[in-house]
């Protein structure tokens, strides 16, 4: 029964990962909507969907994209952006990890200014 339990757990984990990958792809394909071309749900959900689906390179590229950072800031999601940076880790790509840490540091250091003046991005 222990082996059956482990097999079921592995199958559930695989299904959950496939579901997260589907969510990541769906959010990744959404068109920019809303005020000033910002889709707040996309900006909130997409980094988490990539991270949960172990699509870490995609998450790193998204989180290091200036346009995406601007969308998150203009949508008032600075705290969420900082949390995304902290959740992310790219062990297979040290260069991307350095970039993510630099973006985190920039947003963290300028959090108050970016919150008050999102147009500065």
Image (cartoon, rainbow, N blue to C red):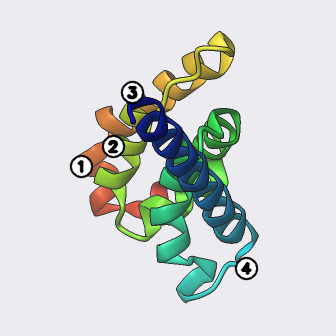
Q: Disc 2 and disc 4: Cα gap in Å?
A: 24 Å
Seen in the picture, residue 101 relative to 30 is either above or below; the reply is: above
User: Sequence order check: which comes first, mark 1 or mark 4?
Assistant: 4
**Viewer-nearest of labels 3 and 1?**
3
Q: Are marks 2 and 3 in contact (CB under 8 Å)?
A: no
- Density class for disc 1 (Cα within 10 Å; few <14, some 14-19, many ≥20) is few
Report the residue marked by disc 1.
112
> In the image, what residue occupies the spot 46% across and 42% down?
9
Determine whether, in the image, residue 7 is placed left or right of residue 92: left
Total labels: the figure holds: 4
Secondary structure type for disc 4: loop
Q: Where is residue 33 drawn, in percent x and y?
A: 63, 85
Secondary structure type for disc 2: helix
Q: Is residue 60 visible?
A: yes
Q: Disc 3 and disc 4: Cα gap in Å?
A: 29 Å
Report the residue marked by disc 4.
31
Secondary structure type for disc 3: helix
């Amino acid at each position: 029964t222990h082996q059956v339990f482990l097999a079921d757990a592995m199958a559930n984990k695989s299904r959950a990962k496939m579901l997260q990958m589907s969510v990541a792809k769906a959010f990744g394909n959404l068109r920019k909507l809303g005020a000033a071309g910002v889709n707040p749900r996309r900006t909130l959900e997409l980094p988490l969907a990539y991270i949960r689906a172990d699509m870490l390179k995609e998450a790193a590229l998204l989180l290091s994209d200036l346009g995406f950072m601007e969308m998150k800031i203009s949508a008032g999601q600075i705290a969420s952006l900082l949390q995304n940076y902290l959740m992310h880790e790219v062990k297979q790509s040290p260069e991307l990890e350095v970039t993510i840490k630099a973006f985190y540091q920039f947003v963290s250091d300028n959090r108050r200014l970016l919150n008050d003046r999102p147009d500065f991005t």
